[in-house]
Image: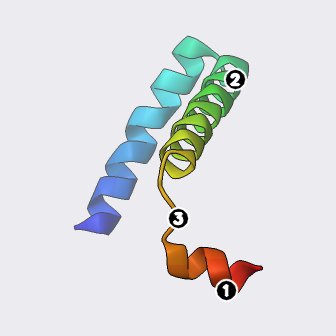
Amino acid sequence: MLAISQVLAMFVAEPVAQQAGIRNLYFGSAAMLAIIGVVGFRKLHGQKVPEAAKTTAA
């Protein structure tokens, strides 16, 4: 099932890359990766550290 979806994605990727331009796709991919990183950082930054972890880290 996974192999079939990968083959189908390859058939779809070529026309999309030709239409949008490979350079634009790279920039779009980089932007999405940066957004995912920022969201992950904010989620982790907002979590509280348990007291046990604070005492063992020092």
The residue singled out by tag 1 in the image is 56
Q: Position of residue 14 (x, y in %)?
A: 51, 32
The foreground one among 30 and 11 is 30
Q: Residue at x 61, y 23 (%)?
A: 28
The residue where tag 2 is placed is 27
| Label 1: element kind | helix
Few, some or many residues within 10 Å of mark 1 (<14, 14–19, 20+):
few
Is residue 12 placed above or below 46 in the rendered structure?
above
Measured as percent of width and height from the top left, residue 37 is found at 61, 42
Position of the C terminus by quadrant? bottom right
Q: What's the CA distance linking mark 3 and mark 1?
A: 12 Å
Residue tagged by mark 3?
Answer: 49
Viewer-nearest residue: 57 or 12: 57
Question: In percent of the image, x 34 and y 66: which residue is there?
Answer: 3
Q: Amino acid at mark 3?
A: Val
Which residue is at a point 38% across and 56% down the rendered structure image?
A: 6
Q: Please state if 53 lies on the left or on the right of 4 as rendered.
A: right
Q: Identity of the amino acid at label 1? A: Thr
Q: Return the residue found at the far bottom.
A: 56
Q: Extreme left residue here?
A: 1
